Amino acid sequence: MTVTKRPRIAILGRFAEHTSATRLSAVVNARRLLEVVWAAGGDPITLLPVEGSNWDERLEGFAGVLMPGGADVDPRRYGQEPASDELYGIDPLQDEVDISIVKYAFDNDLPLLTICRGTQVTNVALGGSLVQHMTEPHRHHVAPVVIAEHTLELGLSQPAVSASCYHHQIIDELGSGVKPIAFAAEGHIEAVKYEGLSWGYGLQWHPEDNYGDDAAQLEIVRRFVDEARGRKPRD
């Protein structure tokens, strides 16, 4: 019997002021997100955001990086002052460590999948900017999205997906090498290709929300995990 080893997927943790399971503040990732990576064949590992991280050491044995959703990026990171009362959860350390691991992934051509905030902070890391607050936020918003390009590279059997969104910010100016490949009905960007990577894509929606009902969501994450499996882990 042949056993295929699960590639270890690094998922940077998110700071939480409190959870129902902890007395104090916590470092978390969504259970559904970890479960979809496992269902896709990967071994999801949450990493503590630490200032000045040596990613050569910390990512030893990892084969891919997934940047999850979370709170807002500080507008100062993209050259703006905060201009909306809707901004929430800004944390300088979270921003710093997010950007540093993203840059490491690009410098070392690691398979990269980004989700919601993960896509936004990656765009910022590559020199782009964000709309601080949408006129009509996409919270609890589910809508069809068609992937215009790269369907095969994303592992999709068909180009239409049911995008489950929960965000109030979107990409504004594109970062270097960030190529839009899907748009919402309102015209804003819903998915991107990172041209600086052999395999790297960003989603504005949350594939973990409905992967049990929409096969396309699991197909995307499975393709990411397969790409990671095909790469030699960092050592």
Image (spheres, grey):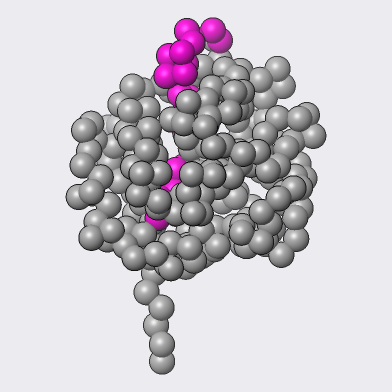
Q: Is residue 175 above or below residue 213?
A: above
Span of residues in magenta:
64-84
Judge from the rendering whether residue 113 lies leftward or rightward of residue 165; answer left or right: left
- Residue 193: x and y in percent read 59, 45
Judge from the rendering whether residue 36 lies leftward or rightward of residue 109; answer left or right: right
Q: Nearer the viewer, residue 191 or 12?
A: 191
Q: Quadrant of the C terminus?
A: bottom left
Q: Quadrant of the N terminus?
A: bottom left
Judge from the rendering whether residue 46 lies leftward or rightward of residue 89; answer left or right: left
Quarter of the figure with residue 132: top right
Residue that appears at 68% across and 57% down? 151
- Residue 34: x and y in percent read 45, 54
Q: Is residue 66 magenta?
A: yes
- Residue 202: x and y in percent read 56, 43
Q: Nearer the viewer, residue 133 or 234?
A: 234
Residue 21 visible to an observer of this rendering = no
Q: Is residue 226 magenta?
A: no
Residue that appears at 39% across and 64% down? 231
Q: Nearer the viewer, residue 54 or 167?
A: 54
